[in-house]
Amino acid sequence: MKSARRRAREYALQGLYQWLLAREDAGVIEAHLREDTGFAQADQAYFVTLLHGAIREAETLSNGFAAHLDRPLAELSPVEHAVLLLGSFELAHQPDIPYRVVINEAVELAKSFGGTDGFKYVNGVLDKQALVLRASEVGRKGR
């Protein structure tokens, strides 16, 4: 059984994917996703926070994790890019969620929606991004 937060992340990922491909307005994307029959089981407030926040800060977030990529940002698959936006947003703006949980959730999304080994790439990039965005938390955990 998926948690309401997991469902919120899944819908936010779908919205970010759509935004990356079509650059539609976030409100239009949100309205479209809300029509899905399973949307009622998602944490709707968290979905809104993730979708709108990641779109609003997409350039800053992308610039932040681009330093950890082994290829140009434009060469990322849209799924990997969307997962990295989502994970980076959570690392930067949801300090109540432990960084290991953020990374694990992103890896699970990449496994479900991405290519065969995309989750490994997402894990490596977000692990490095956590060192930047959550340095004190990562240091306390002793990695």
Image (cartoon, rainbow, N blue to C red):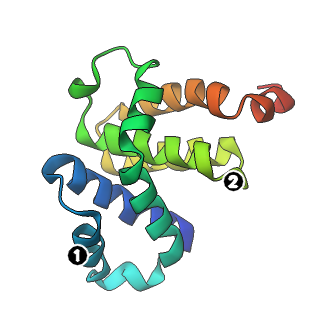
Residue 81 in sight = yes
Q: Is residue 74 above or below residue 15?
A: above
Q: Residue at x 66, y 25 (%)?
A: 131
Residue position marked by numbered label 2 in the rendering: 97
Q: Is residue 126 above or below residue 86?
A: above
On residue 64, the disc is none
Residue 35 screen position, x and y as percent? 26, 83
Position of the C terminus by quadrant:
top right
Residue 72 occupies which quadrant of the picture? top left
Residue position marked by numbered label 1 in the rendering: 32
Q: Residue at x 54, y 50 (%)?
A: 105
Circle 2 crowding by C-alpha within 10 Å: few under 14, some 14–19, many from 20: few
Q: Residue furthest right?
A: 140
On the picture, is 65 further left or further right than 18? right
Q: Is residue 78 above or below residue 96?
A: above
On the picture, is 143 further left or further right than 99? right
